[in-house]
Image (cartoon, rainbow, N blue to C red):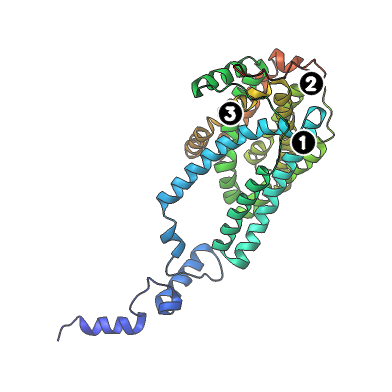
Amino acid sequence: DSPCIPPVLAALQKYGCSTSSARSALGTTALHAELETLTARFVGKEAAMIVGMGFATNSTTIPLLVGLAAITGAAFALELPAKTGFITQIVRGPNLQAANALLGAARSGAVTVGAALAGVLVATLGVGVTLAIDAFTFLLAAALIASIRGLPQIRPAPASLLRDLRSGFREFISHQWLWTIVLQFSILVAGLEAVHGLLGPAVARESLGGSVAWGFIAASSGFGTVVGGLIGIRLKVQRPMWFASLCAFTFAAPPLALAFLAPLPVIMAAAFLSGMAGSWFGLLWYTTMQTRVPPELLSRVSAYDHFGSIALAPVGVLVGGILYEILGPQPTLLLAAAAVIVPTAAVLFVPDVRRMRSDDPLPDRTPTAPRGI
């Protein structure tokens, strides 16, 4: 006799007993159809498909993802400096520049092709299978690296972590060109992170037609990096750090093109130029470091390099977002370009950067035999 029973029965007959499970279990209801129509209208598409329950969401919880991201970040922090030193154990002398160029081209090509391949795999096999394949590629890469046998090395005497940090820092600050360019990049990378991580996609969405335009811009940068790496195999430069610093000026081209809302092909050309010049900077930077820093200290010095270069990157994204809301896109992009141009121009006045030549006599890089043996 309760007045609630008839409406409940009517709702059960019309909508089913639940909408919180997969359609394969409880079927499709009128609520699904109504929500799909509203969603398609909201995103501006002809149709949309709604999944009643996200099984991946239930298993890959936010705390788990945060923890795994922290582990991944720590792994990269160890891998990047170690890789810089490891290259000198498998490649020597005049082949270092070509090796660094090939590595850069392969890395950029893998990122560019991998992004496109991931889209195909997601469309055909689904997200879960694609992520599993991605994880397997990392395991395969680790196995391939583990199979490499480097040239014989003299191991330095074991020391405490603090002593290793001190010795690496002493070597780091002993090279004027090294610490000044790392200081330059701490500001430069902060500006570029704001562009690539926030400002560029926002401008593309609001003024260039959406994410497809930003995809073309990012792909142009990646293609430029590949082309630059291939050219870099034969690149001959007399003043490596001077030329590398000049290349860094091109990093301001994309934010400037975005600031003035240049046509999409112009922005793509700026991104291509920036990517190509960036690959030249990278191969000259790593080759110079690998030839002028003692091998037993190379990874430690590289750790300071990576830490200093990206230390302000999160700050750049944060400040970029705040300035975007206060000043708007154009002034913020111009400030990001200034964060590239000003410190780069300052570095050109550093004596070591101006005077260093590729044919300068190199210091003795033979490691000192460990004491006590």
Indicate left or right for 116 with 308 as reference. Answer: right
Marks 2 and 1, how far apart at CA: 19 Å
* Residue with the most extreme left position: 1
The quadrant the C terminus occupies is top right
Callout 2: helix, strand or loop?
loop
Circle 3 Cα neighbour tier, 10 Å, few/some/many (<14 / 14–19 / ≥20): many
Earlier in the chain: of badge 2 and badge 1, it is: 1
| Pointer 2 residue | 239
Q: Residue at x 55, y 35 (%)?
A: 77
> From this viewpoint, is residue 78 visible?
yes
- Relative to 271, say whether 89 is above or below: above
- Relative to 167, say whether 264 is above or below: below
On the image, the x and y values in percent for residue 19 come to: 37, 73
Callout 1: helix, strand or loop?
helix
- Relative to 174, say whether 48 is above or below: below
On the image, the x and y values in percent for residue 15 come to: 36, 79
Circle 1 Cα neighbour tier, 10 Å, few/some/many (<14 / 14–19 / ≥20): many
| Pointer 1 residue | 99
Earlier in the chain: of badge 2 and badge 3, it is: 2
Residue type at mark 1 is Ala
Judge by depth and name the residue closer to the eye, 372 or 54. 372
On the image, the x and y values in percent for residue 366 come to: 72, 19
| Pointer 3 residue | 303
